Image (cartoon, rainbow, N blue to C red):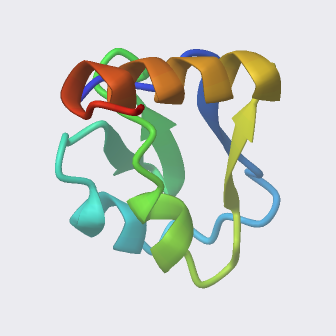
Amino acid sequence: MVRLKGLRAVTSFAACNGCGLCVDNCFTRALSVHEGKLLRNDSRCKGCGRCAAVCPEKAITLEVDDVAEAVKDIMGRIEQRVSID
């Protein structure tokens, strides 16, 4: 799994209560909680959004820098696998 270009997970530390539910759901093990604060290893994060989906405080969001570039990246990945004629 390769992260979408320009995609990043953003944490609102004011909203995060350190419950660790996101850590339990991160299959790449990119997240950990240390002294009640969420830590993310961005080199491991694939931007799947599982952490954001399970966060009860909605403290994690996914952001895309350039939507047009992200769509281009997605279309390129699809065209590698599917004939679109």
At 40% from the left and 64% from the top, the residue drawn is 22
**Location of residue 30 in the rendering, given as x and y in whole percent from the top left corner:** 30, 36
Identify which residue is drawn at 73% across, 51% down. 13
The answer to whether 36 is drawn above or below residue 34 in the figure is below
In this image, 12 relative to 17: left or right? right
Residue 59, compared with residue 27, is above or below; it is below
**Image check: 59 left or right of 30?**
right
Near-viewer residue (24 or 73): 73
Q: 46 and 72: which one is in front?
A: 72
31 to the left or right of 54 = left
At which x and y percent is residue 24?
24, 67
User: x and y percent of residue 45 in the render?
Assistant: 36, 31
Q: Is residue 30 visible?
A: yes
Of residues 84 and 41, which is closer to you in this image? 84
| Residue 11, image x, y percentages | 68, 46
Is the residue 73 above or below the residue 52 in the image?
Answer: above
Residue sitting at x 25%, y 34% = 82
Image quadrant where one finds the N terminus: top left
Residue that protrudes farthest toward the front in the picture: 85
Q: Quadrant of residue 21?
A: bottom left
- The answer to whether residue 65 is visible is no
Which residue appears farthest toward the bottom when viewing the image? 56
